[in-house]
Image (spheres, rainbow, N blue to C red):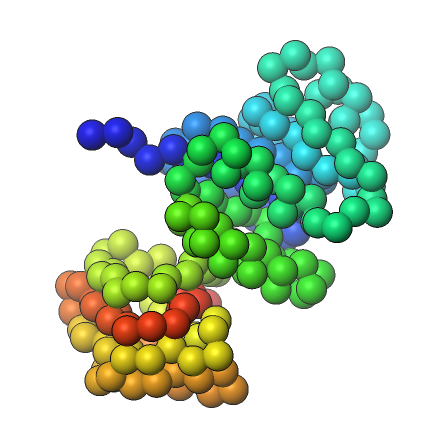
Amino acid sequence: MEQTKRALIVTGGEIDKTLLLCVLQKEVFDIVIAVDNGLLPLHLAGKIPDILVGDFDTAKPELIEYYKQKKEVEIHKFIPEKDATDTEIAIKLAVKYQMKEVILLGALGIRFDHSIANIHLLYWLMQQGVHGEIWDTHNRIFLTDHSICVKKEMCFGTYISLLPLTDRVAGVTLIGMKYPLHEAVLEKGSSLGVSNEIVSQQAQILLENGVLLIIQARD
């Protein structure tokens, strides 16, 4: 059985050093992409990226020059005035290289506009048939437009929140969770799906139509 091709994208938001080291040690990726100043934590962790992307307005010039000397690093430089963020360009490169799963680190942080944009990029990935997730110290974020099962032992944190990304998500049934639902409708403007918990060995999240934003979280 062919293995899913995975990409790690490290972008310029907040990145916990311990989390990055854990991901690099425990996870297997076919390509690692550094986005602008996302290069710095990778460099400090001793990991050479396969691809470096950005307008390089935040990365240290001497660090960029250092990696320009490395023939194994593919570099894509863009001007700051462009129609896509550096992270979007990196994601589209990952799809171009036929990745079927994309994990983003540093996609959340002080710039809330970038955080929201990165969540919307998960939607673009889903439309391409690629599974995307955003990870940080407290959250794992992904989207689904179909029913899924989540094993309690595999859940990242204590809490699991379900929020509609589309205007409404219909036919939502939750089984094996502290606060069950039966054929409910989740609509934008409601916090109904926030802070649920898995209470069985496996939870079922069923839906008929729409797109759910799923956040596995811990304090």
Q: Is residue 88 above or below residue 213?
A: above
Is residue 147 rendered to the left or right of residue 91?
left
Q: Position of residue 145 (x, y in %)?
A: 36, 64
In percent of the image, x 69 and y 25: which residue is there? Answer: 75
Is residue 188 rendered to the left or right of residue 93?
left
Within the image, what quadrant is residue 150 found in?
Answer: bottom left
Within the image, what quadrant is residue 211 found in?
Answer: bottom left
In percent of the image, x 30 and y 59: which residue is there? Answer: 155
Observer able to see residue 25: no
In percent of the image, x 61 and y 64: which residue is there? Answer: 116
Q: Position of residue 118 (x, y in %)?
A: 59, 56
Q: Is residue 113 above or below residue 37?
A: below
In percent of the image, x 69 and y 44: which residue is there? Answer: 86
Name the residue nearer the viewer: 214 or 151: 214
Name the residue nearer the viewer: 3 or 70: 3
Is residue 205 rendered to the left or right of residue 114?
left
Observer able to see residue 4: yes
Q: Position of residue 1 (x, y in %)?
A: 20, 30
Q: Position of residue 136 (x, y in %)?
A: 51, 54
Q: Is residue 101 above or below residue 25?
A: below
Q: Residue furthest left?
A: 201
- Counting labels gives 0
